[in-house]
Amino acid sequence: MRRDRWAESAWLSALVISIVLRVVLDRAGYDYLVIVAPYMLVSFATPFVILAGTLRHRPPHRAGWFLMVAAQLFYAAADTLTVLDDWLSGEFLEPTPADLLYFAYYLLIASAVLLFIRRRSPGWDMPSMIDALIVAVSAGLITWVFVLQPLTSNSELPLPAKLTQSAYPVLDLMLLILAVRLAIGTGTRGSVLYLLLGSLVLMLGVAGR
C-alpha cells in the first residue's frame, strides 16, 4: 500500500513539475525543443505508467487497459512527429502522418472505453443510453454551429485539410458521448473511474481549445 502511494505521489509530482517547467521555459524564451521537452517526457511516460499499473494490480479484465497503453503509444508518436514538423518547417500540409496516428489514438481509446462500459454495465441500460443520446444531440448541434459549419465554409482551405480538421471535433464528440455513458452507467464507482473520466475530460478540454 505504501509503495502504491509513493508511486502515485511520484507520478503526480512529475506531472506538476513538467507543467511548471513547460510554462517557465516558454516565458524564459528557451529553444523550442527545450520548451516542449517536459511535455514530451509526460507523453512518452504515460503509456509505460499505465502498463506498469496494469501489470502490478492485475485487474480481472485487462484488455481495455492494454488498449489504452497502445493508444498512448500512438499519441506519443504523433506528438513526436508534430514537434519535429513544427521545429523543422512549421508548415503542416494536412493530413500529416501525425494526423493518422492521432486518429488511431482516438479509435483505440474509444475501444478501451467501450470495453470499460461493457464491464461496468452489462446489458443495454436504456436510461443511461438515453441520457448519453441527449448529450450527443446537444453537443453535436453546438459542434456543428461553432466548429464544423465555419470550417466547411472556409473557401481558403483545401478539401483534405477540411476533412482532417473536421474529423477532430467529430472524434472529440465521440469520446464525450462515451465518457458520459461511462460516468452515468450502472456499476461500482471508485478512484480509478474518476481518474479515467478526469483524463478524458482534460483531453477534451485541451482538444477544444
Image (cartoon, grey):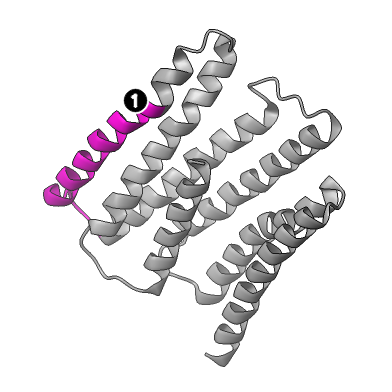
In magenta stretch: residue 164: no
* Residue 75 versus residue 39 in the image, above or below: above
Name which quarter of the figure residue 55 lies in.
Answer: bottom right
* Residue 107 versus residue 141 in the image, above or below: below
In the image, residue 204 lies at what x, y percent?
A: 46, 46
* Residue 33 versus residue 160 in the image, above or below: below
Query: Depth check: 44 or 153 in front?
Result: 153
Name the element at disc 1: helix
Mostly what secondary structure, the magenta segment?
Answer: helix
- Side of 104 relative to 178 (left or right): right
Q: Residue at x 40, y 59 (%)?
A: 197
In the image, residue 148 lies at what x, y percent?
A: 41, 23
Q: Residue furthest top?
A: 155
- Side of 84 relative to 186 (left or right): right
Residue beneath disc 1: 145
Crowd class of label 1 (few under 14; some 14 to 19; many from 20; radius 10 Å): few
In the image, residue 57 lies at what x, y percent?
A: 51, 75
In magenta stretch: residue 126: yes
Q: Residue at x 44, y 19 (%)?
A: 150
- Side of 126 relative to 178 (left or right): left
The magenta stretch is: 121-146
Residue type beneath disc 1: Val
Q: Is residue 37 visible?
A: no
Name which quarter of the figure residue 101 lies in.
Answer: top right
Query: Depth check: 40 or 76 in front?
Result: 40
Q: Residue furthest left?
A: 127
Q: Is residue 54 visible?
A: yes
